[in-house]
Amino acid sequence: MTARVGDTGAGHARANQAIPVGALLRLETGQHTAPVRQMQLTPDGKTLVSAGDCTLRVWDITTRQRLRVLRGQIGPNVDDTPGHGQVVRFAISRDSRWVVVLKSWRATGRASRAALTTELQVFELATGKLHAAFSHPGRWVDLDFSPDGRWLLVAACGPRSRATLHTWAWAEVLHAGFGPAPDGVGSATFGTCSGDDEVPVAARFVPGPWPTGIDVPIVVATNPSSRNRSGGRDSGNPGRLCWARLTRTGQLSLQHSALTDGPIAPGTLAVSRTLVAVAGRDATDGSPGRVLCHDHQGRPLPSKPTLNRPSALAFSATGGQLIVGLHARRPDFSTVQVDVYDTSNGALLLKSSYYGHDDTITAVAFCADGMVVSSGGDDQALHFWSPAYRVGAAVATLRGAGRTLWNPGIDEQGRIGFGAVPGRQLPAGHPRRQQRFDLNTMTLHATGAGEVDLCKTQSAKWSLRADAPGPSIPLRYRSTDSNLAAPPDLTLFVGNDDEWVLFSRSGYYNASRRGDRHFGYHINRGPTREALFLPSDRFSPVFYRRDLIRAIARHGGEAQARAQGLDIPAVDVTSLLPPIIEMAAKGSVVRGEQVTLRFGVESPSPDNPAQRVWLVQNKRFAWEAPKLSATGQYKVTRPLQPGPNTFKLLAEGKRSRSLPVTHTVQGPAADITAISTDTLPGNLYLLCVGVSQFAAAGTEAASGFKPLKFAHKDAIAVHDALGKGRFSGTQEEGVQPSNKAFNEVHARLLTDEQATKAHILDALNALCAQIWARDKTHQAERDVLFVFLAGHGVRMKGKPKLYFWNHDLDPRPEKLDTTGLSMVEVGRIATAVPAEVVIAMDACHSGMAGANTLAGVSAEEVSRRIYAVNERGIYVMNAARGEELAHENVSEGHGFFTAALLTALDQETSLVAENKGGKEHAVSMLGLIAAVQELVPYLTTQGQTSVFRTYGDLLPLTIYKR
């Protein structure tokens, strides 16, 4: 899906085609969002490239991991309408370094073929950088490299439906830059071709190697025009295969041709050293198909009948095998097979069939080891399978997070039901809809038998109109849904990982913990630069507005919410573009046990210059630029830890943050006789804050928030437990700090009148300064900063900032910023230290708000905002979910969350012997989290559920020992 966001109206001319420049709202599931049109292995056999929608995705064959995504300019309807920058075809250079891409454009408001423009782009595979690009009027539909890599061949559907070939010297194309197209070397015309939306002409070099000086043969496939005189579309007229020659000077000459036995699909053309194969195109969909074969003299071989019409063909590198993917007769009806034929004897002998796809096979390829990769349906997944057996054996599947959402429906209560499993896989009588999303509670549930089958595609309020099943469900407010060209009022995406995101026309969204990583903005940066994809969390908290999405869902759309007086700002994403970080050519230099990193920071939007640049090393905050560089160039020297050192470089403007750039450097070899630095204890820096009584209590400004009974006692108890190893429940003076898990404990306690904004920040900054001072001399030790907050958490209605209610907070709107302790400010200070960080909050008493002036803080949102500050490894512990009360336990004299925390630290079941037979028992952070998560619902009889978040690959951490 795609929707325009913040279009400035700017554009650039590209052969009479105005291409929008700006930001476009898109889903990013980790896979293509439209059928995969082509797959090709690099000649070195190491990398697979797949093409679909507007992107090329590069995959490592060995690890089967995605390496990068190649993006160019796109238009607003790239998934829906041809001519918006979709990939038509690509070819990989013979040295495996470059990929050349054809993309189609159509002039706005014009449907004729004269309005078509084709753009040729050259990307560097290793970096994803756009190296060259130029446009040409007309429709270019295929391309191929000569076996020696010197020439680039392009096939076009020219004027009057003439099939035309052009050749360029590859060196000239590579060095063309972004100016006009280089002069072609050769050209030839091969008769008529079909003018429909499928590939009307295809051309392939006959695989080499060929001796130097020998003319290289080319095979061209064309189909008769759909406007032929003898009848309607595909009325039985034969297709044509033509053989041409490319001379050593790049000239083309026609040699001979042959008519095929009936119409063909030129886009399925496959060529080996001895054979040509193409799919026979029958007059009626659903009838059995055929594979048509010829030798290079043009002589036909017996055709091979297939169960359905062939849709994708490819020969193996040696030409001894042929893959044939088939069309589906109907989606969601049955599996669709892929066949592999042995062609070594000049005939097609069925060798293996794979039955793993649920829709038309759109692309196939052989891997260097004989493995087959195919794509079709199944949310554009790539299936790797072995044809060594009669029934192909599945080996691996590369899937994105998306999946087809079947049979969506909505009831009058605003609950959306949908199927997560296609009908062909369901047991007889099973409900069609297996999941439900509730627009009122913003929660995802599994459904019981028949629970949502009464849902319809319309309710009194919403219409769920979709042309075909897909990975998202568009919702339109029924009184304004007549303009189907406009983006939906709301769009729901639910991934196969159960992460979800619900977003509006303007890009505001609510999401599950990691749902927003599947959703963001495609950024067109002009014709000379590759495009970017920025996940929505790069703009947080600009667009992460749970309150706005709830209001839009309640009122029916942004326009309706604005009519009710809700402030929904119109945000131009192009003015918020974050800084861009790029490593220098020699980005890292290692000398001894230190590394010097060199990188640049560019601010593409003058309205959002870089304000901060920092570095995370091995999941810990490591460096921040003391001042910004006027040139945007930075050089940082850091000590290396033994083993791999992973650096994450980040920068941010006022309202958005860069994509992280990750760089790994190998450190010195670890001394296996030494104590592991992963477990070597350091110091504990502990700050406990509890506010039961606050200055604004009892005033009108408090908006119904009342004093708490035990928040100050919560802070005292956690301070004594972690800092002194005492569980008496009362503060005791004169007891020395002690926690056997650490060398030293440095603890600060602030309650009620002591817990002013200034005092809290001073105490936190002082602890952080101690950590930084120790880092210079004790880098091998694992210091820990533990921040515990007990009290109210609040935010202004409709505002993104979150606050802890410090004693002197003045909740009046004009005073809140200056007197309130921002949770983001706490996170900014606490996470900017070279230590492990734990933030625990018994501070989400959301249900105590008595008026509309203030609203409670969501635990989920607190966690997300704190992590977003520095994107480093961190533990976040919250008392309750956002929709729940964080209760206080009168009998215990503590909040239930704090009582569970103290019990987990003190009870024997949480303590684990550090060494076999050892006397010291310890509590790890993960053990503490598991115990509290189990105890809170038990103590509250299921009335409260604590929320825990761990970010980064955190190493085992002991937090308490006795």
Image (spheres, rainbow, N blue to C red):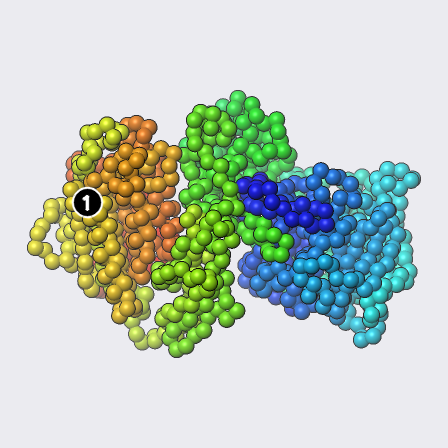
Q: Point out the image quarter for the C terminus.
A: bottom left
Going by the image, does 14 lie left or right of 696? right
Which residue is painted at 86% across and 46% down in the image? Answer: 160
Kindly give the residue lying farthest to the left in the view shown: 734
Q: Is residue 748 above or below residue 795?
A: below
Q: Is residue 755 above or below residue 348?
A: above
Label 1 crowd bin: few (<14), some (14–19), many (20+), radius 10 Å = many
Which residue is painted at 14% across and 58% down in the image? Answer: 737
Q: Position of residue 878 (x, y in %)?
A: 30, 44
Kindly give the residue lying farthest to the front in the view shown: 630
* Numbered label tally: 1
Q: Position of residue 862 (x, y in %)?
A: 34, 44
Res. 735 visible in picture: yes
Q: Point out the image quarter for the N terminus.
A: top right
Q: Which residue is mark 1?
A: 755
Residue type beneath disc 1: Ala
Q: Is residue 694 above or below residue 300?
A: above
Res. 458 visible in picture: no
Q: Is residue 903 above or below residue 872?
A: above
Q: Nearer the viewer, residue 348 or 382?
A: 382
User: Callout 1: helix, strand or loop?
Assistant: loop
Which residue is painted at 62% across and 50% down in the image? Answer: 73
Which residue is painted at 65% across and 48% down in the image? Answer: 12
Q: Nearer the viewer, residue 106 or 427?
A: 106
Going by the image, does 87 lie left or right of 669? right
- Image quadrant in which you'd find residue 705: top left
Q: Position of residue 903 (x, y in %)?
A: 21, 47
Q: Nearer the viewer, residue 215 or 696?
A: 696
Going by the image, does 702 lie left or right of 515? left
Q: Position of residue 481 (x, y in %)?
A: 58, 27
- Image quadrant in which you'd find residue 487: top right
Kindly give the residue lying farthest to the top in the view shown: 460
